[in-house]
Image (cartoon, rainbow, N blue to C red):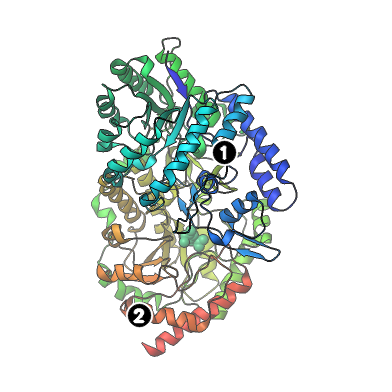
Amino acid sequence: MVASSVLGFPRIGANREVKKAVEAYWAGKISADELTKVAAEVKKASWTSVKAQGGEFSLYDHVLDHSAAFNVIPKRYQGLGLSPLDVYFAMGRGRQTEGVDVPASEMKKWFDSNYHFVVPEFSEETDFKLNFNKAVEEFKEAKALGITTRPVAAKEAKPGFQPISLLPKLLPLYKTLLADLKEAGAEWVQVDEPILVLDSAAGLEKEFTSAYTELAPVAPKILLTTYFARLDTNVNFVAKLPIAGLHIDLDRAPAQLEDVVKAIKDTKIVLSLGLVSGRNIWKTDFTAAIKLGQQAIETLGADRVIVATSSSLLHTPVTLASEKKLTEEQKDWFSFALEKAGEVTTIAAVLSGSQDAARRAFEQNSDDTVRKRVAAITDDQLERRSPFSVRKEIQAKTLNLPKFPTTTIGSFPQTKEIRQARAKLGKGELTQEGKEIETVVRFQEKIGLDLLVHGEPERNDMVQYFGELLNGFVFTQNAWVQSYGSRYVRPPIIVSDVSRPTPMTVKWSAYAQSLTKLPMKGMLTGPVTILNWSFPRADVSREIQSKQLALALRDEVVDLENAGIHAIQVDEPAIREGLPLRRSDWDAYLKWAVDSFKLATAGVTDKLQTHSHFCYSDFDDIFPSIQRLDADVISIEASKADMKLLNTFKQYGYSNQIGPGVYDIHSPRVPGGQEIKDRLKSMLDILPDSLLFVNPDCGLKTRGWKETEASLVNLVEGAKWARENY
Ligand code: GLN
Ligand code: ZN
């Protein structure tokens, strides 16, 4: 009999109960007890519907849970007279109440997912101790319901997150925690070590060996889980660890099965096969999954094989049952967390010989015209007609911008009225948005910006807006996925070949241009970003999907130029985060990602100035790809990162124009005039003055008008000062 398991489950609840309760608690509307009660109900629901579940629950973030449990609590959150629960939330989101004013801890992306974890802060002063044992408490809570769960005890993330030198201090705590679990009757414990799929883990053999040698004797049977990529050569030392089980991700890295089986063949280690994706929303390809299962059973025997989800289902929505607007056919394609739990059981049953398998079908969703167009892409289509140096001269004449041109990144404050009007009207009518565009244009003229934008009032979200206008996307009502804390996103789903039935932004940009003599910058979201922030399809490569999106955007870019727009910005903030976890996979990714951007933007004449924008930028290791984009201007988030980033541009001799953000838009703070001049001065110490644009860090949609006006006035003044002095 082949066993089955789920590595973890969404925490939000089928009707967003947990999110709502957490926010109600923050607002002082419900008590801590009431919050605990809601959480208990949601836990109960997921434990009873998903048998044999691993993974744990969290009110905010599972990494933060561990920090709180191990007393990794920075000084600034201590001694404030807060309850442990409030200290926990203060670390996650900051707190500003009755005499307490502490900022939130830093957050980082969890590997290559869109989930952000709260980064633990270790220091000399960290007083490690076990404050509470959440794993044991949850285990007991489930047991009281008659369910045996598999607790999760330890997590390590990327290097830097858990300075390895602190291991000796942490190990005794893990020992206590694991021993308590054993004592409470847990047979297995799931220990997450996704770090093992990174290149950097290759150097950690000694640490892993000594840690697990110490933990294994006191702990329940350890299931060491890895996910999101392949173990590669790390399996050589992992196979020698004193563990009872090993979990691998066969959704992301099916090819690793052979090596892993070979490595553990002569041990007693049970292999947990991550066959059902924890990262997408598609039904599992049963034929392929069963084949992998059989391959493992052939060598290891059915008793040493477990069928599981590839990772925690945290990254998927709760259930298809909450979707009332999807067609029956569409529902038949998808599988959310609850349905995936069912798939795991089905696959295990098929592998045990007690059930037949069905095949999923996508192929009817292809569009021949799109496929042929992608197949016919030529290298010529990726390149602008002339090199940047030639384009720059031509554009100087058409755009007639002054030295140190000022511009913004696209969106202007999204007031309540605009959001309501948009929701009521739907797209198409140029009423409320039209008025808003006029306001934004007049405002920019008044304060003296040089390259204008229309302000994006028609957009709900930079990806959703385009997804709704393109063929090939499906939207859900309830498919929320945790981004951080109580913030959830609802990514669109790409279900078939993507094409553009009609222009998407031309009407807005052309209208904005008609209002002013100053040049207007068109505004689009790039192919890689649309892809990365959607659920991609599983039957077609990301490369093909990205190129389909690129072709659709290419048509839009050309249409914008034909409508009289002289500059177009194509935002690609997600290029960096789409990088594969293994370095050896980077080149292939960067090739198609950069090609997609070029395909989207290179269809225009030399007169057209292309812009691109990147947030959260760290380009050190991918710099040649940034240059290869060949955008006429790129704007980057640089107001916080000192001048490190600009030095990278200098070091590589970046040749095109660049707009490093001169102030941080993520806070309502207004940068002083002198502060902006100082920033410009240090930027000009590094960059040639002929290449510099002056702009904020990112779009202004989350800001209020008051601080926006004050900040941009200072920005324009800074640019004028630079014109006089350089
Ligand atoms: N053009 C977008 C805006 O201004 C860019 C947003 C982003 O980079 N995240 O809102
Ligand atoms: Zn940005």
Q: Which residue is mark 2?
A: 684
Mark 1 or mark 2: which comes first in sequence? 1
Regarding residue 321, the answer to whether it shows in the image is: no
Query: On screen, 434 above or below 476?
Result: below
Of the pair 73 and 421, the residue shown nearer to us:
73
What element does badge 2 sit on? Answer: helix
Amino acid type at mark 2: Leu
Residue 107 vertical placement versus 711 (above, below) = above
**Image x and y of residue 720, in percent:** 45, 85
* Residue with the mark numbered 1: 134
- Percent across and percent down for residue 705 are 62, 71
Front tag of 1 and 2: 1
Confirm or reject: label 1 Cβ below 8 Å from ligand 1: no
Q: Of 8 and 345, which appears nearest the observer?
A: 8
Q: Amino acid at mark 1?
A: Lys
On screen, residue 263 versus residue 173, left or right, reads left
Within the image, what quadrant is residue 51 found in?
top right
* Viewer-nearest residue: 271 or 586: 271
Give the total number of marks visible in the rendering: 2
**Residue 131: image location, x then y, percent:** 57, 45
Left/right of residue 480 with respect to residue 656 in the rendered view: right
Q: What label does residue 635 carry, if any?
A: none
Neighbor class of circle 1 (other Cα within 10 Å; few <14, some 14-19, many 20+) is many
Position of the N terminus, as image quadrant, is top left
Determine whether 366 is above or below 104 in the image: above
Residue at horizontal 37 percent and vertical 72 percent from the top: 643
Residue 64 appears at what percent x and percent y? 53, 48
Disc 1/disc 2 C-alpha distance (Å): 53 Å
